[in-house]
Amino acid sequence: MAMFSTLVSPHIAKLHGYTPGLQPSGTGWIKLNTNESGYPPSPAVAEALQKEIGNDAFSLRLYPNPTSEPLRAVIAAYHGHGLTAGNVLVGNGSDDVLNLLVRCFSNPTIETGFTLPSYSLYPVLVSMQDGRSSAIEFDRSMQLPVEAIVSSGASAFFLTSPNAPTGVAFSNADLERVLARFRGVLVVDEAYAPFAKENAIPLLARFPRLVVVRTLSKAHALAGIRVGYALANPEMVELLDRVRDSYNVSRLSQVAAQAALTDRDYYDRLINKVVSTRDRYRSKWTIDHGWFSYESAANFIFVEPRNRAGRSGKDVARSVYDFLFARRILVRAFPNHPLTGSFLRISVGTDEEMVLVDQALIEWTRSEKQS
Ligand SMILES: Cc1ncc(COP(=O)(O)O)c(C=O)c1O
């Protein structure tokens, strides 16, 4: 670093990059720390990939469709609500899409807003632009701070709904209250919306400054393929296209995403399964241990463990984290914010995985090691 200290842009010199959840090497882990799917993608995905590689041996020699045009059309048809390919921008994961949005709407003279706690990539992206951040804190209720967002004066405001790491979804009624009066662009990051009862897509037709961001990494079990997208007004799509890499989504990713989105039955079943497992374990942990968790509309449970003395806290959460880690069960802790420090976020896994997590939590409550 010292070698480049006089050359690097000053704001990059002091930047702290995003820290992704641990991706452990080796096998035998129950990996419930980054909200991936516990289940495999639709078999149609592997078939489509094999076809793309095998039937036309030369296809990988050629660049992909630069705008992912056929995939844009499939995405628009998948969501309906009058959307067309012109309302869709496809990215290399939704992180790519979020990056393009920040590139367009953040700079040193304007404020870009987000809530705290929320997806911690937003402030990092804003810092990469040397942009000014306007962070709005939740209170423990985790309800949407409508007035604070409306009066934030931000050029763009990033909202995660359902929120991460809490799992709390914001109603369309609340989003409309923001959209009716907020003068900036409202980006609703709906990475977890397939697991929720409601989503903001029906609002797009009425609110041209709304952008909905989606990913195939969670509900569609394709985190490894890296496809996300924005649904927005065509003028917004045109802006994002200006700052996008020309070939930002690989040939194989485009093919895999199209195949996934055409197997709706498979994913409807998968999502129902995850939702019922989530609700079952959430109530179980409330009843068995008396542990608080927020009502989750996502594929994870944000739970606040308590020790035998009934105390919760950062140290208690850490003790459970370590106990699980020692049993090769990986969950996520968020020790850096007062509203999240006493919680753990546990992604919903398969039935077998959840039985093992549940047993480990029971063992922890009985163990001598708890704080
Ligand atoms: C709220 C939120 N948005 C976006 C992403 C990134 O998803 P992708 O894999 O599409 O880049 C995540 C991943 O964890 C997330 O939690």
Image (cartoon, rainbow, N blue to C red):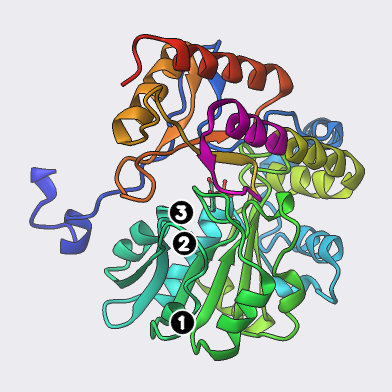
Please tell me which of labels 2 and 3 falls first in the chain: 2
Report the span colored magenta.
278-297
Amino acid type shown at disc 3 = Tyr
The total number of labels drawn is 3
Left or right side of 130 for 263: right
Front residue of 156/370: it is: 370
Evaluate if marks 1 and 2 touch, with contact meaning CB atoms under 8 Å apart: no
Q: Is residue 45 above or below residue 152?
A: above
- Rounded to the nearest angstrom, the CA distance separating label 1 from label 2 is 26 Å
Secondary structure mostly seen in magenta is helix
Label 3 SS: loop
Which residue in the structure is indicated by mark 2?
Answer: 99
Which residue in the structure is indicated by mark 1?
Answer: 147
User: For the residues carrying marks 1 and 2, which lies nearer the camera in this image?
Assistant: 1
Amino acid type shown at disc 1 = Glu
Amino acid type shown at disc 2 = Asn
Q: Residue at coordinates 59% horizontally, 60% vertically from top-left?
A: 161
Q: Residue at coordinates 55% horizontally, 71% vertically from top-left?
A: 187
Q: Position of residue 13 (x, y in %)?
A: 17, 55
Q: Position of residue 249 (x, y in %)?
A: 63, 52
